[in-house]
Image (spheres, rainbow, N blue to C red):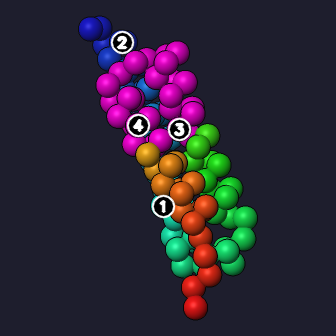
Amino acid sequence: MTLAEFGEAFLWFCLAGVISLLGVAAAVLAICINYFRGTKGGKTPLVLTILTALSAIVLWVMVYLIDPLPVGLIFGAVNSAFTMLAITSWLNRSDKP
């Protein structure tokens, strides 16, 4: 592996890590809003859930088309799991007394 190939792999790893981190942070924020605010949270949890789903799609496209690294697969799987958690949380939201 040349230095250029290593640098490219490192940049793709950093990009996948940032996208995954932003997606997971959006999912956790959406889950917290759904839990504490319920239906009074407005459209913000739905928008965050959609952003989480888009980040998961971008990660899977990146893994499929650009660089099928095992770390990218792990990032995509974790982000997809958090997307499902955010969707489930949004569907099960309710008002707290």
Q: Which residue is mark 2?
A: 5
Q: Is residue 84 left or right of residue 94?
A: left
Tell me, yes or no, whether the highlighted magenta stretch contains residue 74: yes
Q: Residue furthest bottom?
A: 97
Name the N-terminal-most of marks 3 and 2: 2
Which labelled disc corresponds to residue 28? 1
Q: Are marks 3 and 4 in contact (CB under 8 Å)?
A: no
Q: CA distance from mark 3 to mark 1?
A: 14 Å
**35 vs 4: above or below:** below
Residue 18 appearing in the image? no
Name the N-terminal-most of marks 4 and 1: 1
Residue 79 appearing in the image? yes
Which labelled disc corresponds to residue 77? 4
Foreground label between 3 and 2: 3
Task: Give the class, few, some or many, for how many residues have Cα within 10 Å of label 1's Cα (few <14, many ≥20).
Answer: many
Q: Amino acid at mark 3?
A: Ala
Q: Which residue is mark 3?
A: 56
Name the N-terminal-most of marks 2 and 4: 2
Residue 35 at x, y = what percent?
Answer: 52, 74
Q: Are marks 3 and 2 in contact (CB under 8 Å)?
A: no
